[in-house]
Amino acid sequence: MNERRALGFGIAAVLLWSTVATAFKLTLAEFTPIQMLTVASLVSALVLLLICALQGNLAAISATFTANPKYYLLLGLINPLAYYMILFKAYDLLPASQAQAINYSWAITLTLMAAFFLGQKIRKQDWIACVLSYLGVVVIATKGQVLEMRFDSPLGVGLALLSTLLWAGYWILNTKNKADPIVGVLLGFLVALPFAIALSWWEGAPWQTISFKGWASVVYVGLFEMGVTFVLWLSALKLTSNTARISNLIFASPFISLILLSTIIGEKIHPTTLIGLILIIGGLVIQQLKLNKRQVEVQKS
């Protein structure tokens, strides 16, 4: 029964994450990246507060923060504040299909950063995965003109790659986090909100022109990119006894997302985006392989 529930939660999370690239573009049609960050963070914080209340975990919020305030301040400034502000700007400058595909290379970035900061060993297959994935990034960013290295938006590509560094750095810092994961994420939003509101006030972008469709889109982003979906994914991993099977579901997300981008907002998907995405996903699959040749031979004997 638990495995069935885990699979259901995992599939629901992947399907919801598949919609966020489309939601990003719909929201950015009316919001600036800073406005989008501010409202989506507020929605996420409210949802996570409600979840903590339902779990009877409200008391843990202040206790967790006061136990190590500098640590949680740093985490909140990295994610959601810097990470999503930079990611949303990358989506603003690039086609969503490109920004999303480049962002998927964060797991490779994490491997390299973990080796540098945590002293973890990089295996041969990790290097192969790195080469494949970053080749995929270059193919996507140059639309296949790899040798010419021409980018439609060098800044957009740079920001998308920077977002992978921030996301990977956030998870490296999180290796020391012993708090309840939902409480930890909520604290990030609570820390980031005052800074996001201040940035939004400083930017001075108008709010009165935003339509109901824009507000609905940004609420959707707050709910399903930053809030509820994270809880669904954690629940799936907690219930399953086969983490790899649940984790592998995530590989379907970018391809479903491309279909939604094409059908819902009519974004033209360049053929090289699909090729580059396959290279990135191929690198991630290779990275997950745990058996080397000797181990396979032992199992066969």
Image: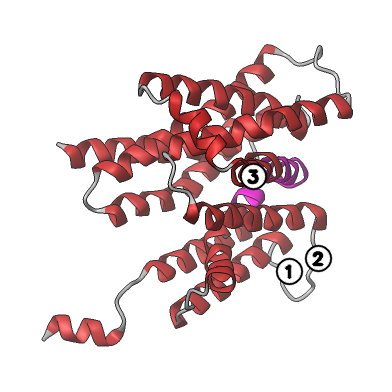
Q: Quadrant of the N terminus?
A: top left
> What is the chief secondary structure element of the magenta stretch?
helix
What whole-number distance in Å separates the C-alpha atoms at marks 1 and 3?
45 Å
Q: What residue span does the magenta drawing correspond to? A: 83-102
Question: What amino acid type should be assigned to the residue bearing mark 1?
Answer: Gln
Picture quadrant of residue 218? top right
Residue 226 visible: no
Q: Nearer the viewer, mark 2 or mark 3?
A: 3
N-terminal label among 2 and 1: 1
Q: Nearer the viewer, mark 1 or mark 3?
A: 3
Q: Which residue position is annotated with label 2?
A: 150
Contact flag, marks 2 and 3 (Cβ < 8 Å)? no
Question: What amino acid type should be assigned to the residue bearing mark 3?
Answer: Lys
Task: Measuring from the top left, give residue 22's x and y in whole percent.
Answer: 60, 35
Mark 2 crowdedness (10 Å alpha carbons): few <14, some 14-19, many ≥20 = some
Task: Measuring from the top left, give residue 280's x and y in whole percent.
Answer: 53, 63
Magenta span includes 87: yes
Mark 1 crowdedness (10 Å alpha carbons): few <14, some 14-19, many ≥20 = some
N-terminal label among 2 and 3: 3
Contact flag, marks 2 and 1 (Cβ < 8 Å)? yes
**Secondary structure state at the residue bearing disc 2:** loop
- Residue at position x 26%, y 87% in the image: 294
Instruction: Give the residue furthest to the front.
Output: 67
Q: Which residue position is annotated with label 3?
A: 70
Magenta span includes 249: no
Determine which of the numbered discs, if any, sits on residue 145 in the image.
1
Residue 113 visible: yes
Task: Measuring from the top left, give residue 242's x and y in whole percent.
Answer: 24, 53
Question: What amino acid type should be assigned to the residue bearing mark 2?
Answer: Arg
Q: Quadrant of the C terminus?
A: bottom left
N-terminal label among 1 and 3: 3
